[in-house]
Image (cartoon, rainbow, N blue to C red):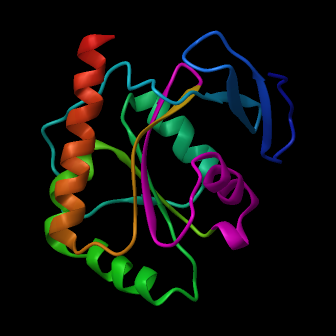
């Protein structure tokens, strides 16, 4: 994958011998990431400090880099401004109990219709409706899906879904 100094998000397909015949890639600010379905996290970092609130990222390339650097899954919430369910879901994500999982991942909220990098990431993970939550592994320049769920979730369902996704990521790491 070519490296460029452009801030544009580039997606290209290239051949791969791993698990499928094609790979999708993203080049963000000169950092190349490949999208390979079926690959999990290489490792997941755990810390003891539990923040009371999730710190949401809004920059796609920054969040991808942070997730890779910290060896944590990337949780992406795709939403749209005119989506009523998205507004209700955003309220659920602000509840204090959601902070219990804040240390387990890097969190990103994006609006694909107003952000070209978010739109390309949404296309890459095949977002079909809003809100959609996608949990991704970002290791070694490779973006791999862990889980995806579309539609409104209350805070407890979101927490439970994230815990299952994080457990699946850890399980994949042990079998790799």
Indicate the quadrant containing the C terminus: top left, top right, bottom left or bottom right: top left
- 64 or 51, nearer to the observer: 64
Q: Is residue 146 left or right of residue 27?
A: left
Give above or below for 164 relative to 153.
Answer: above
The picture places residue 146, in percent across and down from the top left corner, at 39, 38
Q: How many marks?
A: 0
Q: Residue at x 27, y 77 (%)?
A: 92
Indicate the quadrant containing the N terminus: top left, top right, bottom left or bottom right: top right
Give above or below for 37 relative to 76.
Answer: above
Magenta extent: 112-141
Give above or below for 23 relative to 105.
Answer: above
Q: Residue at x 13, y 67 (%)?
A: 97
- 92 or 48, nearer to the observer: 92
On the question of residue 51 being in view, the answer is: no
Q: Is residue 143 left or right of residue 47?
A: right
Q: Residue at x 63, y 45 (%)?
A: 61
The quadrant holding residue 20 is top right
The quadrant holding residue 5 is top right
Give above or below for 2 relative to 64.
Answer: above
Say whether residue 129 is magenta.
Answer: yes
The picture places residue 38, in percent across and down from the top left corner, at 45, 26
On the question of residue 153 being in view, the answer is: yes
The quadrant holding residue 93 is bottom left
Q: Residue at x 53, y 70 (%)?
A: 129
The picture places residue 82, in percent across and down from the top left corner, at 58, 89
């Amino acid at each position: 994958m070519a490296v460029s100094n452009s801030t544009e998000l580039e997606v290209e397909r290239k051949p791969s011998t791993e698990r499928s015949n094609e790979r999708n890639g993203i080049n963000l600010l000169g950092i190349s990431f490949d999208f390979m379905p079926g690959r999990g996290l290489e490792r997941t970092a755990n810390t003891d400090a539990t923040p009371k609130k999730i710190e949401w990222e809004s920059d796609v390339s920054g969040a991808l880099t942070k997730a890779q650097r910290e060896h944590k899954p990337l949780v992406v919430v795709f939403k749209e401004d005119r989506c009523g369910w998205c507004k209700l879901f955003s309220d659920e994500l602000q509840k204090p109990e959601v902070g219990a999982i804040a240390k387990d991942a890097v969190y990103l909220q994006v609006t694909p219709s107003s952000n070209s990098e978010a739109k390309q990431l949404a296309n890459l993970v095949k977002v079909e409706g809003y809100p959609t939550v996608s949990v991704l592994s970002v290791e070694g320049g490779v973006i791999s899906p862990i889980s995806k769920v579309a539609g409104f979730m209350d805070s407890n369902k979101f927490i439970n879904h994230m815990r299952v996704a994080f457990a699946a990521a850890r399980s994949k790491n042990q079998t790799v």
